[in-house]
Image (tube, helix red, strand yellow):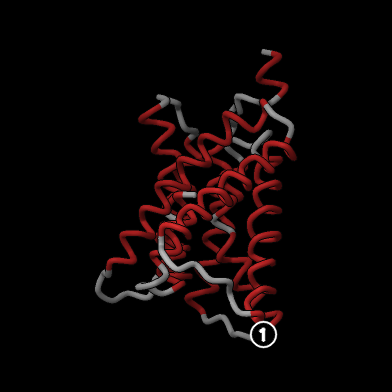
């Protein structure tokens, strides 16, 4: 809920591209959290992949200009999302994916309703907004949370954070295929750096605490 809330507030005063960049800094925050809080040793390939991913994200998303309040909220979103990725690594293998996802979604829904009521004078959105809202709720929230839960049963939090950095790359690709937006040399280079970083992360021989191999050892 904290991640959704901080990102929503951020987008009121900052652009989507800049919010995407700050939010994607969870790519760096997850490994740092694992090193500092859990004293986990990160493979060298991950440390090489991290600056590449951040540089690629900056080329894809960063627009420059003075910092605004929304940028701080987007950074807060990155912190909360990094915490979610680390926590999910520990919890995903202990529960069935579908019930665990349903519990997460229902919890967020309940907290969102409380937020709505506290905001005063709640009203239903217009009819034209229901289609996008259903897509955001079902596909962009429930389905992605289910897939993330399944994925992190066998992928470490640090590797997962780098894979999630592919999100702006795929967004750029879909915007080209679906609405004909062109990608300049800067965006193409940024996307390439993120892809290279993701490939490097997969070369890291980092044991995952919930994999069968780890449990067997």
Classify mark 1: helix, strand or loop.
Answer: helix
Quadrant where the C terminus sits is: top right
Quadrant location of residue 152?
Answer: top right
Residue that lies at the very extreme toward the left in this rendered image: 66
Report whether residue 54 is seen. no
Residue on which disc 1 sits: 179
| Residue 87 x %, y % | 52, 34
Relative to residue 60, is residue 170 drawn left or right? right
Question: 202 above or below 40?
Answer: below
Total count of labels? 1
Q: Which residue appears at 52% of the width and 82% of the height?
A: 184
Q: Which residue appears at 37% of the width and 75% of the height?
A: 63
| Residue 22 x %, y % | 40, 60
Observer-nearest of 185 and 98: 98
Quadrant location of residue 173?
Answer: bottom right
| Residue 157 x %, y % | 55, 38
Residue that lies at the very extreme toward the top in this rendered image: 217
Question: 195 above or below 18?
Answer: above
Q: Which residue appears at 54% of the width and 56% of the height?
A: 165
Observer-nearest of 184 and 7: 7
Relative to residue 206, is residue 144 drawn left or right? right
């Amino acid at each position: 809920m904290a991640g959704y809330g901080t990102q929503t507030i951020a987008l009121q005063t900052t652009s989507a591209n800049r919010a995407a960049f700050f939010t994607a800094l969870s790519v760096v925050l997850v490994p740092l959290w694992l090193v500092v809080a859990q004293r986990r040793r990160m493979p060298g390939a991950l440390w090489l992949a991290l600056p590449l991913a951040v540089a690629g994200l900056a080329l894809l998303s960063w627009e420059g200009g003075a910092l605004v309040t929304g940028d701080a909220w987007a950074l807060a979103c990155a912190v909360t999302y990094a915490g979610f990725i680390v926590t999910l690594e520990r919890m995903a293998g202990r529960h069935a994916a579908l019930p665990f996802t349903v519990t997460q979604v229902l919890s967020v829904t309940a907290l969102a309703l409380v937020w709505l009521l506290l905001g005063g004078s709640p009203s239903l959105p217009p009819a034209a907004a229901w289609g996008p809202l259903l897509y955001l709720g079902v596909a962009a929230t429930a389905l992605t949370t289910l897939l993330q839960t399944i994925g992190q049963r066998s992928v470490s939090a640090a590797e997962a954070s780098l894979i999630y950095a592919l999100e702006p790359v795929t967004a750029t690709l879909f915007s080209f295929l679906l609405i004909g937006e062109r990608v300049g040399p800067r965006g193409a280079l940024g996307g390439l750096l993120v892809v290279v970083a993701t490939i490097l992360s997969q070369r890291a021989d980092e044991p995952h605490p919930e994999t069968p191999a780890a449990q067997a050892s």
